[in-house]
Image: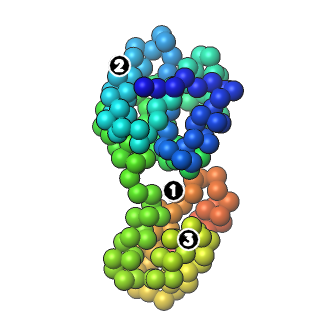
Amino acid sequence: MSIEVTEATFEAEVVERSRETPVVVDFWADWCQPCHMLAPVLESAVAERDGAVVLAKVDVDANPELSQRFGIQGIPAVKGFRDGRVVGEFVGVNPAGVTELLETLTGPSEAERAAAELREAGDLPDVVEALERGDYEAAFERLLAHLDETDADGRDRVRRVMVGLFRDLGAEDPVAARYRRRLASALF
């Protein structure tokens, strides 16, 4: 099952809903043959997840502002939303992309994976604690402090954790932007 989304309903049906349940948005058009090929693949893959993901469809011809807002230049274009932002996407008829996107949406976030990896290794308990309470800024501060105290392998690990957290926050997030610059300065 899928829901039709318009410019008027997009915020509520996609952005806000994705804060509770991940939403896959299929940008399509009736005249687009590849869109019609991808639709059953998407519908089946979402149905297999038994309510863990919502499928929303946006007709690009009827909703040009949404197409422009999300930079749709080719269709079918599929974007996955979690926590109010795009966390994955692909363009074209791409069954492997469907699977990868759904795994990204239903699996742990980068922050959850980072916290689990650090916890398992017994590393940086202060970073783990900050991540578990959702305090990215504190986690970034502690990671940057650790950067100065570690070897090359440790520096690479800090970089990987921070880059994953940047993906969680999204490209437009001001905290991610600020710490991305600070990480670049510290590494280079």
Q: CA distance from mark 2 to mark 1?
A: 30 Å
Q: What color scheme is it?
A: rainbow
Closer to the camera, 76 or 12?
A: 12
Residue beneath the point at 61% across and 62% down: 176
Count every numbered label the image shows and give the total: 3
Q: Which of the numbered marks, if any, corresponds to residue 133?
A: 3
In contact (CB < 8 Å): disc 1 and disc 3: no
Q: Examine the rendered structure and indicate whether residue 65 appears above or below residue 12.
A: above
Amino acid beneath label 2: Met
Residue picked out by circle 2: 37
Residue picked out by circle 1: 167
In contact (CB < 8 Å): disc 2 and disc 1: no
Closer to the camera, 36 or 5?
A: 5
N-terminal of the pair, mark 1 or mark 3, is: 3
Q: CA distance from mark 1 to mark 3?
A: 18 Å
Report if residue 76 is visible in the image.
yes
**10 Å crowding of disc 1: few (<14), some (14-19), many (20+):** some
| Mark 2, secondary structure of its residue | helix
Amino acid beneath label 1: Arg
Report if residue 183 is visible in the image.
no
* Image position, residue 11 (x, y; %): 65, 36
Q: Is 68 on the left-hand or right-hand side of 82?
A: right
Amino acid beneath label 3: Arg
N-terminal of the pair, mark 2 or mark 3, is: 2
Mark in front: 2 vs 3: 3
Q: Is 174 on the left-hand or right-hand side of 124?
A: right
Q: CA distance from mark 2 to mark 3?
A: 42 Å
Q: Examine the rendered structure and indicate whether residue 62 appears above or below residue 136.
A: above
N-terminal of the pair, mark 2 or mark 1, is: 2
Question: In the figure, residue 182 lies in which quadrant?
Answer: bottom right
